[in-house]
């Protein structure tokens, strides 16, 4: 199980199917919340995650197994709702407080 | 949190990941090029003889765009996904072989030959790169691409083109049979459940879109573009969740409605369905209603409305089709709403779990529990 300390996270990647729709929306909302913490957020198609390590990968549970296949060594967080998801809220607070973040 | 979500656990279900991956690759070749499809669709809607402002000179662009440009763009993008810029170039060369072998728009053929050609070049580069002497990289690189590209184009012309051509004929005949017998609404039985499993892009851009383009080339519009993209069923579901859903979900529903119906991000309603899987019946009923209305009023769209927003719908609706299109969306939303509403009302008992989850969530927010 991959883990990372919130204090070491510089960048969060949000993945979705096409990398052009829902991930862009989530990334934008997240970027706003993490701006003050100095953490950047980007978005990508889940097919293109592989190849480089990521601090934290965020994606919907329905795409979770593909994300984990692509980046087995990175922390993958799966959320359930695109709006008002508690896992995302917790990730934000963990990042701000520098708490330990455990992948799904 | 695991027991909060009964369906859609990302940990297993390998077949779903595999199908998603294949579909994702197909969609990944199409989605970046949607803008070109829309340019073509609008050009068609404006200037063909039955369009808004018929114009013979300008409509001469319609054919070359659909037959040449769009398949080459798809092949190019597919090649780029596999092997970067070199992959994109060889894929474009090879795609031309598939295109000239047939008379129909060769999307499926481009989706096969593009990545294949790039993969072949990747293997060739893998062999040649280590043994290329310094200073000869450009010479060997250009000619290895040129020669293998030529061979892949010939393979496409002789092998893949004819096979895909007959395959397209079979698929097209199947769709025509479904349309003629009035059974097309049954497609919603498959499409709506697959959609919420995040196969939406695979179905629309991988299967229905290419069929629709063949249709639209002949008649100027197609119903195929509307089967998966209709925002009506999702709207009905979100409205039902707003009024009758579990309390913990009601708050986010209005925002989700705006993002779904106006913004066209359908993914936003999938989690609601996964939380209350029976609601899929509402989506199926709504989707089938929409297809039935579209078919009965004889409407279609000129290109894929992507994203599936009401604004994109209106932009690609050809003249005279607005009534049927809007009626279909409205009725599909109404049917989906009514069915979902009663399902949610009937399953009220399940709210206890969600209340518990909500309490747990509150505790989590304050950091009291994990």
Image (cartoon, rainbow, N blue to C red):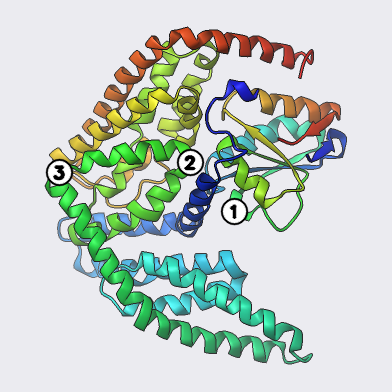
Whether discs 1 and 3 lie on one chain: the answer is no
- Is residue B223 toward the left or the right of residue B3 in the image? left
Residue B319 place in picture, x, y as percent: 20, 46
In the rendered structure, the residue with mark 2 lies on which chain? B
Q: Residue at x 34, y 26 (%)?
A: B281
Regarding residue B84, the answer to whether it shows in the image is: yes
Residue for badge 2: B198
Nearest to N terminus: mark 2 or mark 3: 2
Q: Which mark is residue A47?
A: 1
Task: Say which quarter of the image contains residue B295.
Answer: top left
Q: Residue at x 79, y 16 (%)?
A: B367
Residue for badge 3: B298
Q: CA distance from mark 1 to mark 3?
A: 38 Å
Task: Say which quarter of the image contains residue B112.
Answer: bottom left
Q: Is residue B116 above or below residue B35?
A: below
Task: Say which quarter of the image contains residue B292.
Answer: top left
In the rendered structure, the residue with mark 3 lies on which chain? B
A79 or B299: nearer the viewer: A79
In the rendered structure, the residue with mark 1 lies on which chain? A
Residue B337 place in picture, x, y as percent: 33, 20
Question: Tag 1, which secondary structure?
Answer: helix
């Amino acid at each position: 199980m991959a883990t990372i300390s919130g204090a070491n996270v510089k960048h969060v990647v949000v993945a979705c199917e096409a990398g052009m729709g829902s991930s862009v929306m989530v990334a934008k909302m997240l970027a706003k919340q993490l701006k003050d913490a100095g953490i950047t957020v980007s978005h990508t198609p889940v097919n293109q995650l592989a190849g480089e390590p990521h601090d934290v990968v965020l994606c919907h549970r329905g795409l979770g197994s593909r994300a984990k296949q692509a980046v087995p060594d990175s922390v993958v967080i799966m959320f359930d709702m695109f709006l008002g998801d508690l896992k995302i809220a917790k990730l934000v607070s963990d990042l701000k407080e520098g708490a330990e973040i455990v992948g799904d | 949190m695991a027991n909060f979500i009964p369906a859609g656990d990302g940990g297993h279900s390998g077949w779903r990941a595999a199908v998603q991956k294949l579909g994702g690759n197909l969609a990944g070749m199409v989605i970046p090029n949607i803008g070109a499809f829309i340019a073509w669709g609008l050009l068609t809607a404006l200037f063909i003889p039955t369009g808004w402002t018929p114009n013979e000179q300008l409509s001469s662009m319609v054919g070359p765009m659909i037959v040449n440009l769009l398949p080459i763009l798809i092949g190019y993008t597919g090649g780029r996904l596999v092997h970067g810029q070199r992959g994109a170039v060889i894929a474009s060369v090879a795609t031309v072989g598939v295109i000239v072998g047939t008379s129909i728009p060769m999307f499926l053929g481009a989706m096969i030959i593009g990545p294949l050609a790039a993969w072949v070049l990747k293997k060739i580069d893998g062999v040649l790169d280590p043994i290329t002497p310094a200073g000869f990289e450009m010479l060997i690189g250009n000619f290895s691409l040129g020669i293998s590209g030529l061979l892949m184009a010939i393979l496409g012309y002789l092998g893949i083109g004819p096979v895909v051509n007959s395959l397209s004929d079979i698929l097209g005949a199947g769709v025509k049979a479904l349309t003629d017998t009035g059974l097309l609404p049954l497609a919603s039985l498959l499409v709506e459940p697959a959609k919420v499993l995040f196969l939406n892009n695979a179905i629309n851009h991988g299967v229905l879109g290419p069929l629709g383009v063949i249709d639209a080339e002949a008649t100027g519009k197609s119903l195929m573009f509307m089967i998966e993209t209709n925002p009506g069923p999702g709207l009905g579901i979100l409205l039902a969740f707003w009024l009758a859903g579990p309390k913990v979900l009601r708050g986010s529903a209005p925002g989700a409605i705006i993002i779904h119906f106006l913004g066209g991000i359908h993914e936003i309603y999938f989690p609601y369905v996964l939380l209350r899987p029976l609601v899929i019946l509402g989506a199926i009923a709504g989707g089938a209603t929409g297809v039935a209305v579209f078919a009965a009023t004889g409407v279609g769209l000129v290109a894929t409305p992507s994203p599936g927003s009401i604004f994109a719908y209106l932009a690609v609706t050809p003249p005279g089709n607005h009534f049927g299109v809007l009626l279909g969306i409205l009725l599909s939303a109404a049917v989906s709403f009514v069915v979902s509403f009663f399902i949610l009302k009937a399953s009220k008992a399940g709210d206890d779990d969600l209340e518990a989850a909500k309490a747990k969530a509150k505790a989590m927010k304050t950091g009291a529990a994990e």
